Image (cartoon, rainbow, N blue to C red):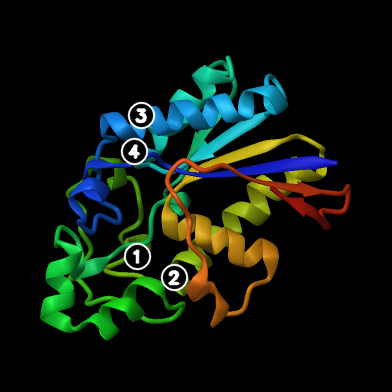
Amino acid sequence: MVSLILVRHGQSVANEENIYTGWTDSPLTPKGENQAKIAGQLLSNSFHDQIAEYHTSLLSRAIKTSYIIQEELDDLAKPLTKSWRLNERHYGALRGLNKDYTREKYGKHEVALWRRSYKKRPPLLGRPDETEKMYKYLDIKSMPVGESLEDATKRLIPYFQDVIAPRLLDQKNQMIVAHGSTIRALIKYIEDISDEDIDGVEVDNAQPIIYEFDDKLKLIDRK
């Protein structure tokens, strides 16, 4: 049996202020740091020195959450791979806007579709944003101007299939520290949830989800 642990980052400043961020950096709040610490403590009994590798996005809120969890597990020496494919979904022209404001401007129903449905995209940017130094090495064709959950899933799942799954098949426990939408995308893929039913899936900050698989990667249990 092998385990995959999924963790959404701790509370960020944008979470606290109810603002869309997506690919924009937003640091953890003190509460978010404490949430990450508690997540590490919750995992320490079962997974102390039992996780082979860690994976996270290019965004500091996820990276720092991973570092805090690793520290609690006395695991800072273990590999941590950062990939843009694990980034939060890109919220396009909603980025930086207060969520309550967007409900007033566009209507609650439309905003609910942008946030929770599988295929609906938010209003798009006019062109890709290349100003963030963390993305300077990316091909501009890979830079989104806004993503649905489906779009985020399509750039995320190849990372799972090519990087995570082979490690799990080698019976090496893996942890992914990412974001609300990308964790939802992974849950949809792993549990084979329908496009319609993923609307009801919620992912809380820094609440570990543990999947256990057999040696053929057939899902055995979720905790």
Q: Is residue 121 visible in this depiction of the protein?
A: no
Residue drawn 69% across and 47% down? 223
Q: Which residue is mark 4?
A: 61
Label 1 – label 4 distance at C-alpha? 25 Å
Judging depth in this view, the residue of 201 and 188 nearest the camera is 201
Give residue 54's quadrant in the image. top right
Q: Which residue is mark 2?
A: 149
Residue 84 in sight: yes
The amino acid pointed to by label 3 is Glu
Crowd around label 3: few <14 · some 14–19 · many ≥20 (10 Å): many
Looking at the picture, which amino acid does disc 2 mark?
Answer: Leu
SS under mark 4: helix
Closest to the observer: 162 or 33?
Answer: 33
Disc ID at residue 141: 1
Sequence order check: which comes first, mark 1 or mark 4?
Answer: 4
Q: In the figure, 167 relative to 183: above or below?
A: above
Residue closest to the eye, 33 or 58: 33
SS at mark 1 in the image: helix
Which kind of residue does numbered mark 4 sit on? Arg
Q: Are marks 2 and 4 in contact (CB under 8 Å)?
A: no
Label 4 packing within 10 angstroms: few (<14), some (14-19), many (20+): many
- According to the picture, the residue beneath numbered tag 3 turns out to be 33
Answer yes or no: do the residues labelled 1 and 2 have beta carbons within 8 Å? no
Mark closer to the chain start, 4 or 3: 3
